[in-house]
Image: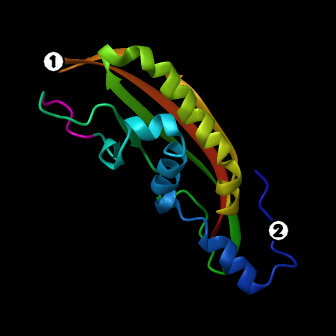
Amino acid sequence: MEIPSCRGIGEKEMAQNISKSNRLDLFSKIKSAILNSAILQRKFKDENFYEFEPPFHSLTFKHLPYIVINIPSTDTKDDVQVFDHNIVGKDYEFTIMLVMDYEARDNFKAYAQEIMKNIEAKESDFELDGFYDLEIDLIRSPVELLDKRKVISGEFKLTFNGSVNR
């Protein structure tokens, strides 16, 4: 992995560039990209997005379909610690999971394509925020039985890299 050069960048520009790479804000950025689709806006509202798996086991759970956006780990224990404000490259990898009622399975492919299309369409916005080389792939779409509910669950892998201040 190539580490970006800081030569010729003033302290103010460097701080501005670094502050935009906020891993904890990725949930709202991805959610916004997904909801950029008129098709997905009709089906998914704020209560349909989660950072962690929701309590869907109950038959009274009313938020199907839903999307889980797992933000990347902020753990830096494996990173080399540098104490002089250097910029280092960091790879990010996380998953987006789409879960739907089995009865709505005919819509799964259309929703999955919309999610991928809209995240890819926002690549330039992610780059403005310091996240580069975005890739998204559908990696799993099985039918599962969850308690007394049959659902379709598809998982996307989203990867990109950015620079962080160390």
**Residue that badge 2 annotates:** 5
Whether residue 141 is visible here, answered yes or no, is no
Mark 1–mark 2 Cα distance, whole angstroms, equals 55 Å
Where residue 1 appears, x then y in whole percent? 75, 50
Where residue 44 appears, x then y in whole percent? 38, 39
Q: Quadrant of residue 68?
A: top left
Q: Quadrant of the C terminus?
A: bottom right
Where residue 132 appears, x then y in whole percent? 70, 52
Please rate how many residues cluster around mark 2, counting C-alpha atoms within 10 Å: few if below 14, some from 14 to 19, many from 20: few
Give the answer, above or below, for where 35 lies relative to 128: above
> Mark 1–mark 2 contact, CB under 8 Å?
no
Residue shown at 53%/35% (left/top)?
115
Residue shown at 61%/64% (left/top)?
80
The first of marks 1 and 2 along the sequence is 2
Where residue 82 appears, x then y in whole percent? 63, 73
Instruction: Name the element at disc 1.
Output: loop
Please rate how many residues cluster around mark 1, counting C-alpha atoms within 10 Å: few if below 14, some from 14 to 19, many from 20: few
In the picture, measured across the screen, residue 131 lies left or right of residue 41, that is right
Q: Which residues are magenta?
A: 54-58
In the picture, measured across the screen, residue 88 lies left or right of residue 151, that is right
**Residue that badge 1 annotates:** 148
Residue shown at 33%/42% (left/top)?
48
Instruction: Name the element at disc 2.
Output: loop
Is 56 magenta? The answer is yes
